[in-house]
Image (spheres, coloured by chain):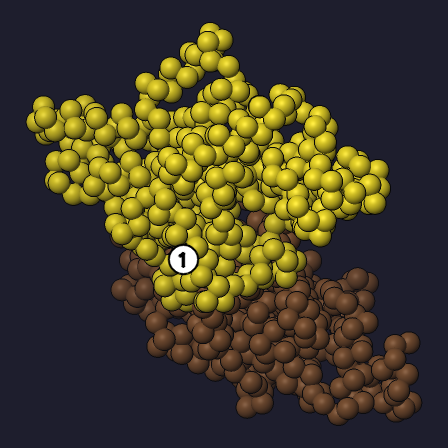
Chain colours: A brown, B yellow
Amino acid sequence: MSEVMKQLTAEQLSEVKRQMGIYTQGVQDIIPVEELENKVAKSVLENRPLKIKLGLDPSAPDVHLGHTVVLKKMRQFQDNGHIIQLLIGDFTGKIGDPTGKSVARKQLTDEEVKHNAKTYFEQFEKVVDMEKVELHYNSQWLSQLNFEDVIQLAGKITVARLMERDDFEERIAFGKPISLHEFFYPLMQGYDSVVLECDIELGGTDQHFNILMGRHFQEKYGKEKQVAILMPLLEGLDGIEKMSKSKKNYIGIDESPQEMYGKAMSIPDELMNKYFELITDFSPNNLETIKTGMESGNLHPRDAKMLLGKTIVRMYHGIEAAEKAEQQFISVFQKGAAPDEMPLVEWRGNTEMPVIDFLVDIHLLSSKSEARRMIENRGVKINGDKVEDTGILVSINHGLVVQVGKRKFVKIKML
Amino acid sequence: MSEVMKQLTAEQLSEVKRQMGIYTQGVQDIIPVEELENKVAKSVLENRPLKIKLGLDPSAPDVHLGHTVVLKKMRQFQDNGHIIQLLIGDFTGKIGDPTGKSVARKQLTDEEVKHNAKTYFEQFEKVVDMEKVELHYNSQWLSQLNFEDVIQLAGKITVARLMERDDFEERIAFGKPISLHEFFYPLMQGYDSVVLECDIELGGTDQHFNILMGRHFQEKYGKEKQVAILMPLLEGLDGIEKMSKSKKNYIGIDESPQEMYGKAMSIPDELMNKYFELITDFSPNNLETIKTGMESGNLHPRDAKMLLGKTIVRMYHGIEAAEKAEQQFISVFQKGAAPDEMPLVEWRGNTEMPVIDFLVDIHLLSSKSEARRMIENRGVKINGDKVEDTGILVSINHGLVVQVGKRKFVKIKML
């Protein structure tokens, strides 16, 4: 038992154990877990909140369920009186890509950064209490550093240590160039933790290296080291890649109840438990019941999936919307005879296009004139909704169900 | 023939050839030589002087003959109307070593930088016309860079390119750490050339990588690329290592005529031609005569060495001092029966110590009392000067000749 743990009363000790039980739930890794326990113990002993940092990239403010894995963990800390430090990495965003090669990494203006941050916060409100959150923009301190400060910072880390980062190591192995400025992104993230004096930094497992930079630089600058809490990455609807906007395999937390529910129904069976654990508000007991139910065959995967879909809609749109989405699904896809297994059509084209072209492109109908006729005869449904107008645009996304006539169904698989 | 060369009149062309003949003399490498010719041609065509940069480390202002190799080349450009840009790398000096590991790389104050620069210039005056030199301190622009500027700079070079530098490559191979800030020294040197818009950068072959950084960054910043002129490194009196203060194998250009002459006499025979070529003001014809003279045996190595010693003293102290130094050498070491081959005593101790201790330490005399008696009897000479006082301190340096009695000589070899 550590020195600080020894100073606790029995009551305080049980409070520490209680909090640790919550914080360790569903995480992939805590580095190191003993230090987390000591920090929680100290916080209980001194009645002082811990500071938990979450870094955000201001260039892509669309929040999806993948993000909520970390947000939910933040909420747990918040519920126990700790302080969340949301860190907008706007300094990086304002620089853009100095090599000029990446179009994606274009330079953001102050207004864009502020707008994107606001977009984040509006969405975050659904998971965390934004009133209690500390907001920080790292341009505030990073833009103040001069060349000498940068040299001092760079003097506190070796080239070899930086090259250990998986993606750098890989690029070196394959002879792909690394531009020197790229070495500075982990340094910045580490330095942010020095400035903010974070106790904990939260992130996905893909942030392992960068979050450990915080520990490294805090130590070099004579501060107490933060603990890394790494959350598992949530695979997207394709069941393979990490959920992300660019992969089009996500459920956005701002999407409509119907879209959410429909997309939830396309989650692969084998990911159900992970989704329940990481993105719902179910208690450990409930999670266990679902898991054993599916294992024993008492809970049919589709029923579990419907529960998941309903839960997600409830969390972001309320119970009424959830029940409505469920009802609609039942009437369209079950009573309406949508088969359990529909042919998949792989799609890598536009995400929006005229309905007539779309019907031809996915080979449901063989010509534009045929497509027009079928719509006019009210024989085309998209996600269960009758298409009333031959001139509309279809928003194409993963799991979209297109029906022609009574029995012809396809489901879209985004590539 | 390049475009610019084609525009020259016959007279101009011969002027270009004349200058190129001078600039290419005695150099180790010109990268690339065609670009140098084009630059000289343009300069002749447009009657515009070229800008030639020489970077100086402000932490070690003692100038020795090794430095004059480059200074002499500078002088040739100056004599043809070109502009010398002396660049004091004070920014680096003011930072010190951010890792705190190197005691040698201590932080310099503004006053120390100014003082050291002045010390340089006083010594340089013996080789170049300091009135016509442009002086620059790189802290003037480097201290103005902020983090964003540094990122932009770092974005213009890859990690792989930097790791090609010999010493980095070696340290990586042997698993020795490279601190990230070290990558910035070549970047700074390159950026200096961007700011100064240098046409040419001069340096020893050990500056190969750093000088090419200037070409690299000038191109990245849309400027005309400088040409690298690399001079051979002059081995010191030990005949092995590059002449340097730290190796104690140097002839300082501020040393007394006697010291200079004495040290010159300790240069290994096989380096004579190189010394004549690189540090004297002899014409190519004279150099050839000396070379063939030694090869044919018509010129005895010791006579050549005496000519070298006399020349060096003449260059830095004038003809009178040179003749006096020669006379003294002849009277002491030749007429005074100093043998051609004296036993060497290897020395790695203090560079200054009481004469009595010194005589015992080098085993010329077996006890302090014997040493005292011998000095009182006027039987001890150091570099031919009788030691008159038992209490003096001896300055110990490479090639120092100590004589006890008529026949007992030793020569000091610094380790």
Direction from residue A297 to residue A383 in the image, left or right: left
Compare residues A397 and A157 and report the one nearer the observer. A157
Point out residue A148 in the picture as x, y percentages from the top left corner. 49, 65
Query: Is residue A136 shown left or right of residue B322?
Result: right
- Secondary structure state at the residue bearing disc 1: helix
Chain ID for label 1?
B
Q: Seen from this angle, which residue lies furthest front?
A: B377
Image quadrant assignment for residue B27: top left
Residue closest to the eye, B48 or B413: B413
Image coordinates for residue A234, horizontal then vertical, percent: 62, 63
Number of other residues with Cα within 10 Å of mark 1, as a class: few under 14, some 14 to 19, many 20 or more: some
Residue A268 visible here: no
- What quarter of the picture does the N terminus of chain B occupy? top left
Q: Which residue is drawn at 91% across and 76% down?
A: A1
The residue closer to the viewer here, A402 or A185, is A185
In the image, what residue occupies the spot 67% across and 25% down?
Answer: B342
Coordinates of residue A252 in the picture (x, y in percent): 50, 70
Q: What residue type is labelled 1?
A: Lys
Quadrant where the C terminus of chain B is found in the figure: top right
Q: In this view, does A311 lie to the left or right of B77?
A: right
Q: Residue at the far top: name it.
A: B296
Residue B355 in view: yes
| Residue lying farthest to the left in this orientation | B9
Side (left or right) of A204 relative to B212: right
Q: Where is residue A358 in the image (x, y as percent from the top left)?
A: 35, 55
Question: Residue B248 falls in which quadrant of the image?
Answer: top right
Q: Which residue is painted at 64% across and 34% down in the image?
A: B401
Residue occupied by mark 1: B118
